[in-house]
């Protein structure tokens, strides 16, 4: 048992990088503001989500109350929470059991399988709680305070809160096991990671899309109309019975309530056992089977060999092709690098698919000659936004990680290496800009010549944004990591890069508004914008080169 | 070939003095073995020669080029293999070698010849079209070695090159080192295997806590005392 706790502590430590943080504070004493900022960001993030959820739950509660079912809010929380747990749980489970690297170290240690397993599950659970708390606690609070509940209610709530990840997690584990049977995830691991990533991105965008449909300030009416009609609880309950048990278990203080409460506990306990059993039976075995990479293991024919040598290229092209290959072939990089460029076009499409009346108004607006300039500049903003969300530049040195010694060793000037990175990121942003342009023409009927001009300005802007983003990563690259995830997802530079991009877009928007107010002719506005960006771009590029020449020398590996 | 003058380097803002006023030279035609206990400062010195770390004090010239002022020329003269072959896992072996060939500006014909020569010698030709991710530790080391030698540099700098190589490959590497130096080039390498140092090296330097405590041929280190083995010399010099 002691062993198990030690192991859990270790796993949590790794998961949240506690030791690394301590080392930074005690020994290195550099860039202390960074973890503080991240912590603040997380705090504000979770805080604002919780606040948003509280508002939402309050809306649902009021709507429910008006149809005499205030407990509806509990049902929704106990359906929504587990649903989120289920979705994220799939990823947590897969990454804890199939993609994690520390197994190589743990397995040879004299530990019992259930200890390793237990510690891994505990980490998954803690992650789940962090996801779940912003959903369930607001509902419990809203209902409890709103209906003036007593001690028993709060006690029961606490128990249900603690148990709440169990059922969805067990279902998730089952799905994972089946999934692993059907597809050999490990062999097509990269493919799976990319597909999974895009699905969760779409899921996120979808939720956003749905959330936008809820009229602000009229949440209660919306829910009343949408959900309030009849028997919502029963309706949802048929899909996911535990939500009913939780609802009545908490809201009814009679025999039925108590029975439902006990039922929830019993089913959770049972599924907890099932979870441990599944873990023992399947996950542990799958860990032991190692991590293989597909290999061809064949000798190239003389002809193929011959061809591969004829491709002699300049150092710049060689560097560019290295950047490009490493980006595309590492799933997290490809995903995070390319996800940015679909956001702009997606938002345009989303506007197009808005509700009918809105859409007609939108078209009227676009085709009104009076508004043509602001609307076009709005299109430009989408293009720049697409470039701004792209983190390829702001993580491009960080991504080299431990292999950065190669870049320091080769006889290629820092300016040349950074230029290759610039080109690589710029090409991706340019692609996003052009896609946004095509979408503008296709969905919103923009005139072609105008779109071409906008794309031109967008490309200049993309250059500026990429350049500034790259500067951030040159200044403070994060090279210490073991898992590629850390280089992009847990890298503050990506976040800073987006901030800087938004700043640039903000400034350009301000300037554009000033131009529109002064009623300058359209083509002069475009010309001036292009000029402004160019004037900013040239010294930035020069600065980037100087910065890299100085900084590459000082990065130690 | 290498000229290190008054080289010093410390980590953690001066808390750990890893290299302390080091002076040493490696001459053309010479295999120089760099010995020392764990944490003595071998890797730190080597990294400064390559330019991976910048020195706090002192200067290094490689092949006549100052590593600080003419870093690109100095780099072009060096082939370096680190102690840990952390290399681009998502490139195939051949892509990696071609990348190296391109950045060192090796013409396609020459490159082809060298790649074929090394991959055949190291038994890699069945693996070059696979991702490096799928390579074993030794295979990675060999691919890094091949990449490092692709431009036929005058100076080889190898950090514990024999660790992890199978006996046949280790033997071949030693032969390669000898042949390379017989052509008037140099090898600077660190090792913990004293027998290898004894047999292979023309001169030996022993570093202890960042300071060079002995340098010279085996004969010179023995100080005329024929019975001393390198092991006993090493143990004596690094005792405290
Ligand atoms: N990145 C680093 N940060 C802090 N200290 C370091 C770092 N790298 C090395 N050191 C310290 O510098 C000293 C010299 O280390 P170095 O790696 O040069 O030793 P070495 O002779 O190569 O040892 P080994 O035989 O184990 O490879 C050691 O005390 C080590 O702790
Ligand atoms: Mg070392």
Image (spheres, coloured by chain):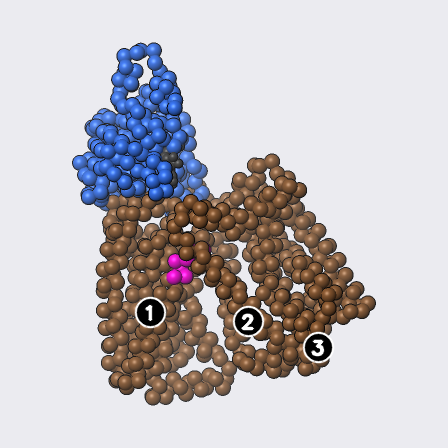
Q: Is residue A150 above or below residue B27?
A: below
Chain drawn in brown = A
- Residue A502, image x and y in percent? 37, 69
Q: Residues within 10 Å of mark 3 (few under 14, many from 20)?
A: some
What residue sits right under mark 3 in the picture? A69
- Residue A432, image x and y in percent? 37, 67
| CA separation in Å, label 3 and label 1 | 49 Å
What residue sits right under mark 2 in the picture? A52
Q: Which residues are magenta?
A: A490-496
What residue sits right under mark 1 in the picture? A504
In front: label 2 or label 3:
2
Per the image, label 1 sits on a secondary structure element best described as helix
User: What hue does chain B carry in this figure?
Assistant: blue
Q: Which quadrant of the figure contains the C terminus of chain B?
A: top left
**Residue located 82% across and 67% down the image:** A255
* First in residue order: circle 2 vs circle 1: 2
Q: Quadrant of ligand 1?
A: top left
In front: label 2 or label 1:
2
**Residue A286 lies in the magenta stretch:** no
């Amino acid at each position: 048992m002691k062993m198990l706790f030690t192991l859990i502590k270790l796993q949590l430590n790794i998961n949240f990088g506690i030791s690394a943080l301590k080392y930074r504070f005690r020994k290195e004493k550099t860039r202390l503001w960074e973890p503080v900022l991240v912590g603040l960001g997380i705090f504000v993030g979770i805080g604002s989500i919780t606040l948003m959820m509280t508002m939402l739950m309050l809306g649902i509660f009021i709507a429910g109350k008006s149809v005499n079912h205030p407990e509806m809010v509990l049902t929704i929380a106990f359906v929504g929470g587990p649903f989120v747990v289920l979705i994220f749980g799939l990823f947590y489970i897969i990454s804890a059991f199939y993609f994690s690297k520390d197994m190589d170290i743990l397995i040879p240690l004299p530990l019992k399988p259930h200890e390793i397993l237990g510690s891994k599950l505990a980490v998954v659970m803690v992650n789940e709680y962090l996801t779940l708390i912003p959903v369930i606690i607001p509902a419990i609070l809203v209902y409890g305070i709103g209906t003036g509940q007593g001690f028993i209610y709060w006690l029961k709530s606490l128990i249900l809160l603690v148990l709440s990840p169990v059922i969805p997690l067990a279902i998730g584990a089952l799905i994972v096991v089946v999934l692993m049977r059907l597809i050999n995830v490990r062999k097509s691991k990269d493919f799976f990671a990319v597909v999974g990533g895009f699905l969760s991105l779409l899921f996120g965008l979808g939720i956003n899309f749905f959330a936008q449909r809820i009229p602000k300030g009229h949440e209660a009416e919306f829910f009343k109309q949408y959900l309030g009609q009849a028997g919502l609880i029963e309706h949802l309950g048929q899909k996911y019975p535990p939500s009913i048990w939780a609802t009545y278990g908490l809201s009814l203080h009679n025999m039925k309530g108590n029975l439902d409460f006990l039922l929830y506990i019993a089913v959770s306990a049972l599924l907890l056992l099932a979870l441990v059993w599944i873990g023992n039976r399947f996950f542990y075995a799958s860990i032991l089977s190692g991590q293989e990479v597909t290999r061809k293991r064949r000798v190239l024919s003389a002809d193929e060999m011959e061809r591969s040598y004829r491709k002699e290229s300049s150092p710049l092209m060689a560097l560019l092709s290295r950047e490009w290959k490493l980006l595309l072939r590492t799933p997290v990089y490809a995903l995070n690098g390319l996800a940015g460029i679909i956001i702009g076009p997606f938002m345009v499409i989303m506007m197009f698919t808005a509700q009918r009346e809105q859409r007609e108004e939108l078209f009227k607006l676009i085709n009104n000659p009076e508004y043509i300039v602001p609307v076009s500049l709005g299109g430009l903003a989408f293009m720049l936004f697409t470039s701004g969300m792209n983190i390829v530049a702001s993580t491009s040195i960080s991504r080299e990680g431990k292999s950065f010694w190669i870049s320091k060793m080769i006889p290629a000037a820092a300016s040349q290496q950074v230029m290759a990175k610039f080109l690589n990121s710029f090409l991706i942003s340019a692609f996003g800009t052009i896609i946004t342009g095509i979408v503008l023409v296709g969905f919103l009927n923009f005139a072609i010549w105008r779109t071409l001009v906008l794309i031109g300005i967008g490309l200049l802007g993309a250059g500026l944004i990429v350049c500034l983003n790259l500067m951030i990563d040159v200044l403070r690259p994060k090279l210490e990591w073991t898992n590629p995830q850390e280089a992009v997802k847990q890298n503050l530079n990506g976040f800073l890069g987006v901030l800087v991009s938004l700043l640039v877009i903000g400034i350009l928007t301000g300037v554009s508004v000033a131009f529109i107010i002064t009623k300058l002719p359209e083509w002069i506005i475009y010309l001036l914008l292009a000029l402004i960006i160019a004037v900013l771009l040239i010294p930035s590029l020069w600065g980037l080169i100087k910065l890299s020449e100085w900084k590459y020398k000082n990065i130690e590996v | 070939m290498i000229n290190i003058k008054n080289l010093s380097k410390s980590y953690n803002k001066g808390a750990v003095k890893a290299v302390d006023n080091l002076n040493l030279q490696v001459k053309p035609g010479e295999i120089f073995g760099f010995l020392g206990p764990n944490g003595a400062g071998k890797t730190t010195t080597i990294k400064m020669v390559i330019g991976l770390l910048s020195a706090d004090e002192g200067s290094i010239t490689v092949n006549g080029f100052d590593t600080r002022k003419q870093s690109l020329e100095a780099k072009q003269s060096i082939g370096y293999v680190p102690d840990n072959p952390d290399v681009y896992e998502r490139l195939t072996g051949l892509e990696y070698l071609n990348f190296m060939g391109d950045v060192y500006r090796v013409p396609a014909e020459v490159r082809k010849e060298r790649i074929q020569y090394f991959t055949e010698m190291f038994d890699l030709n069945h693996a070059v079209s696979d991702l490096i991710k799928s390579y074993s530790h030794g295979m990675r080391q060999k691919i890094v070695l091949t990449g490092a030698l692709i431009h036929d540099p005058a100076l080889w700098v190898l950090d514990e090159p024999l660790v992890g190589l199978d006996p046949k490959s280790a033997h071949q590497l030693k032969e390669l080192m000898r042949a390379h130096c017989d052509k008037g080039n140099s090898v600077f390498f660190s090792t913990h295997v004293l027998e290898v140092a004894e047999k292979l090296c023309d001169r030996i330097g022993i570093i202890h806590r960042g300071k060079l405590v002995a340098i010279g041929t085996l004969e010179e280190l023995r100080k005329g005392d024929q019975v001393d083995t390198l092991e006993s010399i090493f143990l004596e010099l690094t005792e405290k």
